[in-house]
Amino acid sequence: MNLTGHPDLSEDVQRLHELLSNSLGRELEGLKEVAILFSGGVDSALLAQIVSKEYFPPSLYSIGFDKSNDTIWANEAAGLMGLDIEQSMILKEDIEAAIRVLVSEIEMTNPKWMAVFIPLYLGLANIREDVVIMGQGADEVFGGYRKYRDAGPEEAEEMMIRDIAEIIEAEAEFYHKVAKHHGKRLILPYLDPEVIALGKGIPYDHKINDLSNKLVVRGLCEGLGLPTEISQRPKKAMQYGTGVSKELRKVLKASGMDLDEFISSLQ
């Protein structure tokens, strides 16, 4: 699928490239090294491609249970891009330990977010670089979630606006708190105000169609030479791709509590 062949989409693709490149340039000024939390999905792959081609080679890190979807694919994707990657494996006992720290030290008690913050916390723990880039926010800004495709265009746009507000006003604070806990500075290029403004301003059909999502992001991946295996590959959310959601359910079953109760028991 040649996403860049549509002239209107091409204009948005070019603008997204400009904004992401400028945002990364500001954040990377004066640095000689940076880490990227890398799943091999279009969001992290696009950022890795821009950094590697326009600035300097980044260090890629992946996180997940052994033989999880993200662990396997991140390694393959890094190979396709010609970049080195360091992989960290999650162990079953890491799940409860991470929740305890997230609740007691990060004060992150929202059960809706917990399965995302567990791999984030564990992934950042194994990164050597002081500055880390993440692809969080692309799904909300450019229509990555299945729920947007299941809704009609008007409803989906309203949902995206609400979700963007939630991640900016509440969730992002905890991304930075987790990073600070590990002594890291976090860069979230898809939450740059100009990138968000672009996402809100482009039409629905430049984000989502019957076959795919995040069309403008995938289009830029194509335009920057990423292999089709990466630019067109569907990607599970972090909590599913890493295997964390599945193991979290086992932890909760063994405890006899739901996640709300489990979090409350730690407070």
Image (cartoon, rainbow, N blue to C red):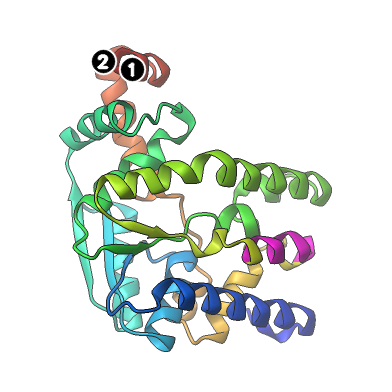
- SS for callout 1: helix
Label whose residue precedes the other's in the sequence (2 or 1): 2
- Residue shown at 31%/76% (left/top)? 58
Give yes or no for contact between labels 2 and 1 (Cβ–Cβ under 8 Å). yes
**Residue 147, position in %: x, y?**
65, 44
Point out residue 165 in the picture as x, y percentages from the top left corner: 65, 44
**48 up-or-down from 89: above or below:** below
Asked if one can make out residue 243 in the rendered structure from this viewpoint, the answer is no
How crowded is the residue under tag 1: few (<14 C-alpha within 10 Å), some, or many (20+)?
some
Dot 2 falls on a residue whose secondary structure is: helix
118 with respect to 86 (left or right) = right
At a point 28% along the width and 26% down the height, the residue shown is 104
Q: Position of residue 187 (x, y in %)?
A: 43, 62
Q: Main secondary structure of the magenta part?
A: helix
Q: Position of residue 239 (x, y in %)?
A: 39, 44
Which amino acid, by three-letter code, is at mark 2? Ser
As drawn, 5 above or below 197: below
- Disc 2/disc 1 C-alpha distance (Å): 8 Å
Residue wearing tag 1: 262
Quadrant of residue 258 within the rendered picture: top left
Could one spot residue 128 in this view of the protein?
yes
Of badges 2 and 1, the one in the foreground is 1
The three-letter code of the residue at mark 1 reads: Phe
Specify the farthest residue to the right.
154
In the picture of the structure, the residue carrying the numbered disc 2 is 255
Magenta span? 195-205
Q: Quadrant of residue 158?
A: top right
Q: Residue furthest front?
A: 30
Residue at 71 percent across and 86 percent down: it is 5
Q: Which numbered disc covers residue 172?
A: none
Q: Work out whether residue 170 or residue 145 is closer to the camera in this orientation and state it.
A: 170
In the picture, the quarter occupied by the C terminus is top left
